Amino acid sequence: MQKPALRFWQIWNMSFGFFGIQFGWGLQMGFMSSIYEKLGATPDQIPMLWLAAPLTGLIVQPIIGHMSDHTWNRLGRRRPYFLTGAILSSLALVLMPTCSALWMAAGLLWILDASINISMEPFRAFVADMLPERQRARGFAMQSFFIGAGAVLASALPFILTNYLHVRTERGGIPLPIRASFFAGAAVFFGAVLWTVLTTREYPPEDLEEFRRAKHSSRGLAVSAREIVSAIRAMPPTMRQLAIVQLCTWLGLFCMWLYFAPAVAWNIFGAPSEKSPVYDAGIEWGGICFGMYSLVCFLFSMALPGLAARLGRKGTHILCLLCGAAGLLGVALIHDKNFLLLSMAGVGIAWASILSMPYAILAGALPVARIGIYMGIFNFFIVLPEIIASLGFGWVMNHALHNNRLAAVEAGGVFMIIAALLMRRVQDRAVVAAEGFEGAAAPARG
């Protein structure tokens, strides 16, 4: 099927759900570690408390991808999963800030992370489903635009509630501004995803009868497992190359997400304890810093398609990863909280590319009939670094870094540099195809 080019507002509508998804995810990544510390967790315990969520994602994502490849009903192929994930995520966001014990928060994070990914991964396949090859970089860049916008508001909301709306917090427990932000996140998540569900219609399978026969034969967990194993064995070379890049990239990101806000509170603000108002102020400023990198992502995503046209998608991603590494490594040199915003600008440039360029490169290398399952498998290389960090980084924090949260952030910058170096090995099939075409045509010009 020759897919027609979509207009700007059509791409806008089909991507808008990511605004809500990232609002929820931004709250999770920006404030969960501080919630854990408020509930009594020590720095070396925090990675392990994140473990249940990625373990679930490792199992859930390829299954969701496989199921969405073989779904067609009144809502379409991917939209039923957007909506289901949005409902579950919104419920988890409402319940999260009411937790009174570590085990409750860890269990809800498990549910929240799995539910967010139920919505997120089919959205990746959605772009490949709906857009022709020449518009995919623009489609993923639009997703980065909304991801940046959602994360800006999510990260800054507790600071805004405290300093501009004068929402007061009581002593001890999870601060009221953070609780209110999670409640708002639930509404935004559900509303944004519902907008995409209601405004975008998916293309039906080209041969509906053949699709129904394939759907019937693909039923059952055992069949799903066999298809997932088969897909992993047949993984395209470009995907294998990108997988190693993703592993290092997301190890760097998780180092930042787990420890950046506490590092600001302890190392920059000099908080004497997690119960101090200085600690709360540092965590809120950490949210502002996350909002800064998300704002830069929001703005820079609009320049990504043009930059990719000049430097190539691979060259663009290498440059952006190096900007992110510089931003994280630069945190060690900063003593004024305001300069942290400049450092986070580099992370924002990297984040815009991380959310778009690998997927744009990957989409062109995948078989059309298995895009959903491969996008789910690609999530392995986001989840596996989180599992590695959860299992091993607590020991590193305790024995090698002496619970220095700032040193953990610096480790994130090192991982970003490694990812940029590994990106040089990746083969972008769209570029190869173009070069191959020119090479074939060359003799005719002689």
Image: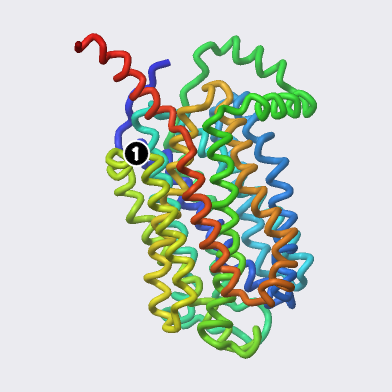
- 144 or 436, which is in the foreground? 436
- 135 or 439, which is in the foreground? 439
Residue ID for mark 1:
312
Please determine whether, in this image, residue 380 is positioned above or below residue 213: below
Left or right position of 355 against 105: left
The residue at the point 74 percent across, 77 percent down is 40
Question: How busy is the neighbourhood of tag 1: few (under 14 within 10 Å), some, or many (20 plus)?
Answer: some
Residue 152 visible, this orientation: no
Image location (x, y in percent) of residue 201: 45, 29
Image location (x, y in percent) of residue 98: 69, 69
Disc 1 secondary structure class? helix
The residue at the point 72 percent across, 65 percent down is 105
Amino acid type of disc 1?
Gly
Seen as rendered, the residue at the extreme left is 446
Image location (x, y in percent) of residue 444: 23, 9
Left or right position of 24 against 304: right
**How are the colours assigned in the image?**
rainbow
